[in-house]
């Protein structure tokens, strides 16, 4: 079961099947973190496109006043699903893709701590995403915004918000399971010599994110159950007529929701922290500051949630307190920005596509961060809240910061995963189209917001003078779509060429994942490396010449290739298993059961239990 | 290092970076997150305490002596759990199974007692939709009860697996893990019993 | 849970005798828990004012909580890191939810 066939290299020519391995069905039973990473990445990208189409629908509807493309009800579903998709079905799973593939390699491990739990978390995510989208065909998609404010969300008669509650409970279970796995992996499976402060920043950010998930997800889970119970069985959690408090929903949602945005952006910060040093040929400036500021952001991130509720009537004491904490959280982020700039300063910069995306991410995030600082000033936020100014802010940070970094990561690590480099020329073209399109789309929204354009509304009248900038924004959105098409073209063209890299360390990188072949063998490392320093790989390749103080190549072979085909015959890794899939399949069945039938709910429970018992009784390492 | 040994190193919990086993670390992280789960449910209850606009109210339905017995039962089950672990650590499988069964039985008694309590409340006019008290009470204790039930399933599974020789030679580790979960469920009840049942609930508009 | 590998002796085994509770000590803890619960229930039946009763009940509950966590869950004798992780969630939950309840003026008169 643990035999490998990685070098088969059969080409299917298109994005969805980029790599031939042991066969189609092996993808359903894999517990290999690398394959699971690819599964996450593929699914996430598909959802990115779906969410992007939803965005185009929004922009087409809003291109002019009194739009008739979508009616109010349809618009509500589209903008709600756009938000849910981009946050829960694209950015989070894409981060999971990177964490899953890269973390074990970066820490010198062969595996993750709980391989089957890892597989379970993927299948639960996939099930949750499909379940959410099935709502379109089963009476209507969620329509209460991704934030689902009660009592609007509890009283809406269409089934959409029930799908919302159940779907996000499922994806929450997925993320929590994955988080426990990755946290323990980082804490407990590092190679000898890799102390916490010799870990790559990407791994550190990963660790912080897993803890944010573990602590934030239970809060939203309870809120979603309370929402579900109000809708499905008429409980009184958010029923003002019975004394219920709609604000309770807001508190619980944002107690999760704010850490959630750091869950979205910290992986991007990690990616940027890997790319900038490699393409500046300089170590990350102020590594410890970058690490500690990441931890600080995670921690303080739990203390700012009510800045989403400044206009909700909490009163001056609460508003002041949260205004202060929100201002404070800008500090560690600023520290990172300066350290990134310090990394590039004086470096030997190579403007390959990953680097352009990384720099773009930092620049766009700074813009979004600046508008964020203005929100922290409570009286100013009274004007900004619920306007497009906010929409501009969060798209600059999540898209400008997060998605740009994701693209950077894709270009950077594509050779590692797929043994091919994405085209440079097309890549740069794609970057510029995206850069222009993105800024055209969201830049004007600052203006629109300050002119008073209200968010979450399906149209606007001509008399408000909002038309021009909306037109600009729509043009920008279609440019973004074009850039995504260009990316896909790049992928297809890259994969019609034969596999193979001129060099297995194509970027002259610094961290351990680049010591393995491209792609790495099933078992990652023939010999677990011993780590002596931060940027271990770099220090194996280069030493500082004592006289000239310049970097010179170390002795040949000192870098040591650690993991190529042909070895690893006696390495036993956990065998594949279909039980995680079975266990995960129970979740959507239970969810449909809650909506339609107790028998179905019971059936889902049985399926889940079967999966868990099969899992518990199966040895983790396959008998040979 | 020999590759087989190196891989064994990755999966041998006693050669981990911290020296601590993956599963136990993972269990404590999980229990940490459960604090936030039950904290949210308990906070919802506390927020809505005394705010129900209609009855029945807690003092009208609670049977404190009855629920106290339930609490003793669950506390006792923690004791039997810890005795099961002690037996497992001494490799006394027979005794371990006995104590595990006792724990499961006490757990079932607890859940059974809760179910009965709910039927009595229902007859007295308290349903999950009746008022804030009903909504928050049944949800909080219901979530707890589901957790207890899952624990009972795990306990019975341990007994079954032990009888079928499917536990490792050192059975104390899985028993310890299930034990941690079980004790956590008990401490949640310690909080619920005090906060929900014993702390008096004012009537709306009352003191 | 079934594993095919041989386990070596658990690393958590205490180095010095007396640091790991005996069965007798566990029973003793159990009895203390019973007594504390009985005290709680009794207190709830007395006529003391809420200002005395409620803190008393909470204190008793906390003591029981700590006893189970430290002894039955073995945190007192185990590696410090387990306790650190657990306390993160516990303290986090207590802090965050307290702030929410305060903002709803639950503790105001």
Image: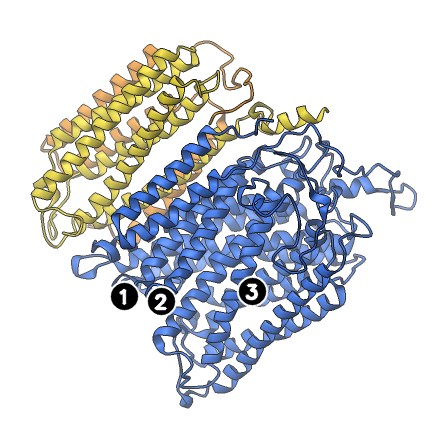
Chain colours: A blue, B yellow, C orange
Q: Secondary structure at mark 3?
A: helix
Q: Residue furthest right?
A: A547
> If you read the primary sequence from the N terminus, does the residue marked by circle 1 or circle 2 appear first?
2
- Between the C-alphas of marks 3 and 1, the distance is 30 Å
Q: Are marks 1 and 2 in contact (CB under 8 Å)?
A: yes
User: Closer to the observer: label 3 or label 2?
Assistant: 2
Q: Which mark is residue A399?
A: 3
In the rendered structure, the answer to whether residue B124 lies left or right of residue B175 reads left
Q: Are marks 3 and 1 on the same chain?
A: yes
In the rendered structure, the answer to whether residue A393 lies left or right of residue A34 reads left
Q: Secondary structure at mark 2?
A: loop
* Tag 1 subunit: A
Q: Secondary structure at mark 1?
A: loop
Residue that label 1 marks: A156
Q: What's the residue at 52%, 27% (across, down)?
A: B21
How far from the left and from the top, in percent, is residue A433? 66, 73
Residue that label 2 marks: A143
- Between the C-alphas of marks 1 and 2, the distance is 9 Å
Give the answer, above or below, for where A603 lies relative to A402. above
Most foreground residue, C42 or B159: B159
Most foreground residue, B153 or A26: A26
Most foreground residue, A53 or C37: A53
> If you read the primary sequence from the N terminus, does the residue marked by circle 3 or circle 1 appear first?
1
Mark 3, other Cα within 10 Å: few <14 / some 14–19 / many ≥20? many
User: Closer to the observer: label 3 or label 1?
Assistant: 1
């Amino acid at each position: 079961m643990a035999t490998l066939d990685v070098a088969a290299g059969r080409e299917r020519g298109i994005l969805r099947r980029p790599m031939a391995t042991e066969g189609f069905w092996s993808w359903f039973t894999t517990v290999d973190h690398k394959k699971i990473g690819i599964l996450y990445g593929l699914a996430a990208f598909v959802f990115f496109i779906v969410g992007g189409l939803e965005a185009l629908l929004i922009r087409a509807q809003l291109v002019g006043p009194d739009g008739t493309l979508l009616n109010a009800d349809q618009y509500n579903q589209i903008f709600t699903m756009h938000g849910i998709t981009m946050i829960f079905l694209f950015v989070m799973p894409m981060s999971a893709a990177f964490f899953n593939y890269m973390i074990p390699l970066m820490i010198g491990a062969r595996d993750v701590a709980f391989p089957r739990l890892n597989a379970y978390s993927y299948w639960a995510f996939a099930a949750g995403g499909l379940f959410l989208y099935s709502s379109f065909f089963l009476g209507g998609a969620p329509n209460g915004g991704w934030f689902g404010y009660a009592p609007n969300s509890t009283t809406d008669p269409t089934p959409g918000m029930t799908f919302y509650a159940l779907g996000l409970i499922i994806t929450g279970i997925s993320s929590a399971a994955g988080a426990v796995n990755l946290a323990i992996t980082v804490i407990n499976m590092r190679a000898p010599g890799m102390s916490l402060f010799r870990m790559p920043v990407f791994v550190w950010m990963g660790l912080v994110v897993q803890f944010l998930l573990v602590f934030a997800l239970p809060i939203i889970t309870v809120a979603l159950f309370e929402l579900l119970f109000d809708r499905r069985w008429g409980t009184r959690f958010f029923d003002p007529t019975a004394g219920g408090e709609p604000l309770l929903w807001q508190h619980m949602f944002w107690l999760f929701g704010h850490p959630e945005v750091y869950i979205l952006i910290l992986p991007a910060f990690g990616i940027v922290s890997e790319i900038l040093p490699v393409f500046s040929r300089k170590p990350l400036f102020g590594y410890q500051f970058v690490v500690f500021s990441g931890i600080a952001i995670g921690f303080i991130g739990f203390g700012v949630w009510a800045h989403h509720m400044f206009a909700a009537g909490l009163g001056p004491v609460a508003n002041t307190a949260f205004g202060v904490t929100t201002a404070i959280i800008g500090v560690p982020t600023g520290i990172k920005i300066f350290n990134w700039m310090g990394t590039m300063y004086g470096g030997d910069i190579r403007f390959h596509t990953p680097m352009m995306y990384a720099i773009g991410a930092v620049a766009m995030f700074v813009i979004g961060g600046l508008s964020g600082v203005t929100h922290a000033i409570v009286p100013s936020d009274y004007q900004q809240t619920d306007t497009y100014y906010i929409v501009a802010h969060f798209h600059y940070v999540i898209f400008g910061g997060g998605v740009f970094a994701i693209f950077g990561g894709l270009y950077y690590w594509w050779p590692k995963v797929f043994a091919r480099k994405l085209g440079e020329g097309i890549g740069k073209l794609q970057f510029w189209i995206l850069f222009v399109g993105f800024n055209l789309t969201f830049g004007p929204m600052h203006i629109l917001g300050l002119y008073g354009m209200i968010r979450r509304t399906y149209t606007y009248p001509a008399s408000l003078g909002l038309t021009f900038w909306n037109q600009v924004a729509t043009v920008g959105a279609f440019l973004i779509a074009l850039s995504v098409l260009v990316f896909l073209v790049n992928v297809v063209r890259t994969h019609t060429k034969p596999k193979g890299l001129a060099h297995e360390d194509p970027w002259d990188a610094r961290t351990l994942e680049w010591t393995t072949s491209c792609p790495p063998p099933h078992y990652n490392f023939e010999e677990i490396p011993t780590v002596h320093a931060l940027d271990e790989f770099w220090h194996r390749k280069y030493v500082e010449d004592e006289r000239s103080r310049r970097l010179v190549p170390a002795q040949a072979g000192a870098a040591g290739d650690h993991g190529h085909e042909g070895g690893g015959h006696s390495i036993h890794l956990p065998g594949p298993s279909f039980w995680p899939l079975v266990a995960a399949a129970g979740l959507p069945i239970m969810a449909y059961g809650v909506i339609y039938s107790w028998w179905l709910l019971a059936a889902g429970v049985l399926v889940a239990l079967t999966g868990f018992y099969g899992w518990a009784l199966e040895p983790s390492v396959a008998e040979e | 290092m020999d590759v087989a040994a190196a891989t064994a190193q990755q999966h041998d919990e006693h050669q981990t970076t911290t020296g601590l086993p993956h599963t136990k670390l993972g269990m404590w992280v999980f229990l940490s997150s459960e604090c936030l789960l039950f904290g949210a449910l308990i906070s919802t209850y506390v927020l809505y305490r005394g705010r129900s606009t209609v009855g029945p109210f807690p003092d009208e339905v609670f049977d404190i002596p009855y629920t106290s017995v339930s609490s003793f039962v669950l506390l006792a089950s923690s004791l039997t759990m810890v005795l099961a672990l002690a037996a497992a650590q001494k490799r006394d499988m027979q005794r371990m199974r006995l104590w595990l069964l006792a724990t499961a039985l006490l757990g079932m008694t607890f859940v059974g007692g809760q179910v009965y309590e709910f039927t009595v409340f229902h007859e007295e006019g308290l349903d999950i939709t009746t008022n804030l008290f009903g909504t928050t009470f049944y949800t909080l204790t219901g979530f707890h009860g589901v957790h207890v039930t899952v624990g009972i399933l795990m306990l019975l599974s341990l007994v079954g697996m032990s009888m079928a020789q499917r536990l490792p030679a050192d059975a104390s580790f899985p028993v310890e893990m299930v034990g941690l979960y079980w004790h956590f469920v008990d401490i949640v009840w310690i909080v619920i019993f005090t906060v929900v049942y014993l702390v008096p609930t004012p009537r709306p508009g009352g003191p | 849970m079934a594993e095919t590998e041989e386990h070596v002796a658990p690393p958590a085994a205490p180095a010095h005798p007396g640091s790991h509770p005996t069965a007798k000590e566990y029973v003793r803890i159990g009895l203390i828990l019973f007594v504390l619960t009985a005290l709680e229930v009794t207190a709830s039946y007395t006529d003391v004012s809420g200002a005395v009763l409620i803190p008393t009940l909470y204190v008793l509950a906390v003591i029981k909580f700590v006893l189970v966590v430290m002894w039955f869950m073995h945190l007192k004798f185990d590696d410090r890191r387990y306790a650190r992780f657990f306390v993160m969630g516990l303290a986090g939950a207590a802090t965050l939810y307290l702030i929410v309840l305060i903002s709803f003026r639950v503790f105001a008169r």
